[in-house]
Amino acid sequence: MPSAEKGQRSSRSPALARDFLKEISTAITSRPSAGVIYGPAGAGKSSTTAHALSPVVQPFAAENTWGLLKQSGAIPKDLAVLPPAETWDDLLGALDQLIEGKHEYKTYVLDTLACAERLCHEHVCNRDYAGDWSDRGFMGFHRGFDGALGDWRTLIERLDALRDARGMGIILVGHATVKSMRDPRLAPFDRWTVDLHPKTWAITSRWCDYVFFETFLFDTTEDGNRTRGHGGDERVIYSNLDASYEAKNRFGIKEPISAGDSAKEAWSNIVRAISASKNGGE
């Protein structure tokens, strides 16, 4: 009969040539950041990302306003824009070429997350359910959404390859939607969040270094039995979680970021806030 000690030894992992203890480090390492900028329509999120460092934009056939933004002067006319992705393979293929090809772009902008998720779901529906969106196919017990998560992780892996192999920052543009939130301590309440399937968003938000909510500043006044809204001329970028909106950052930014008077100024303020946080608030 083998002894308990021998049994314990046999359950351990086999000896490895690599000595992990000798590789322990206290060095501060860094990599290009990856994050989400989302907001309601017209808040300027796409225009803001156009002023990032040497960007290349991935639009989609369903939503492609970059030509109009160039014509209006809201963004640089020489901004690099990839062909609109019409399929999931288009999206991944363009990423592969950015990972492996010769270029000098420093920032990858995906506009928008909702379009990318739709292509992912179409790909899975066609592949696994013969294009059947009904309860007998993709929508049955929400299994299509669950099955698509593996494909969505493939996208995240490609984005990480851009960061690590090519040193590119990642910005994902998202639409905002209001969803009911549940907290065991409170009654249900509403919050602005990114318009994606909850499981898709859970994977994405955990991966991101930041989630910035770019929106308008509003105020209300009571007029008899009615509440009237005012404002909308000034924009702000929220970087920390609030009961009314989802946001986060790993840089240590504490205060909201002013979007200023232009998209270019908004991006400059974001860079300044990140830099100041990394330097201890200087």
Image (cartoon, grey):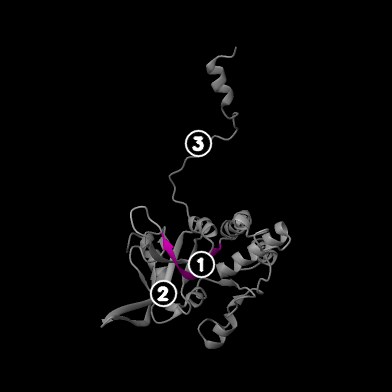
In-front residue for pair 254/23: 254
Graded by Cα atoms within 10 Å as few (under 14), some (14 to 19) or many (20 or more), the crowding at tag 1 reads some
Query: Can residue 179 be found in the magenta stretch?
Result: yes
Compared to residue 52, the image places residue 200 above or below, namely above
Q: Amino acid at mark 3?
A: Lys
Q: Position of residue 219 (x, y in %)?
A: 31, 78
- How crowded pointer 3 is (Cα within 10 Å; few <14, some 14-19, many 20+) is rated as few
Q: CA distance from mark 3 to mark 2?
A: 48 Å
Residue that sits furthest to the right in the current view: 130
**Lower position in the chain sequence, tag 3 or tag 2:** 3
Kind of element beneath mark 1: loop
Which of these two is toward me, 94 or 186?
A: 186
The residue at which mark 1 appears reads as 195
Disc 1 versus disc 3: nearer the observer: 1
Q: Nearer the viewer, mark 2 or mark 1?
A: 1
Residue 169 visible in the shown view: yes
Residue stretch in magenta: 168-181
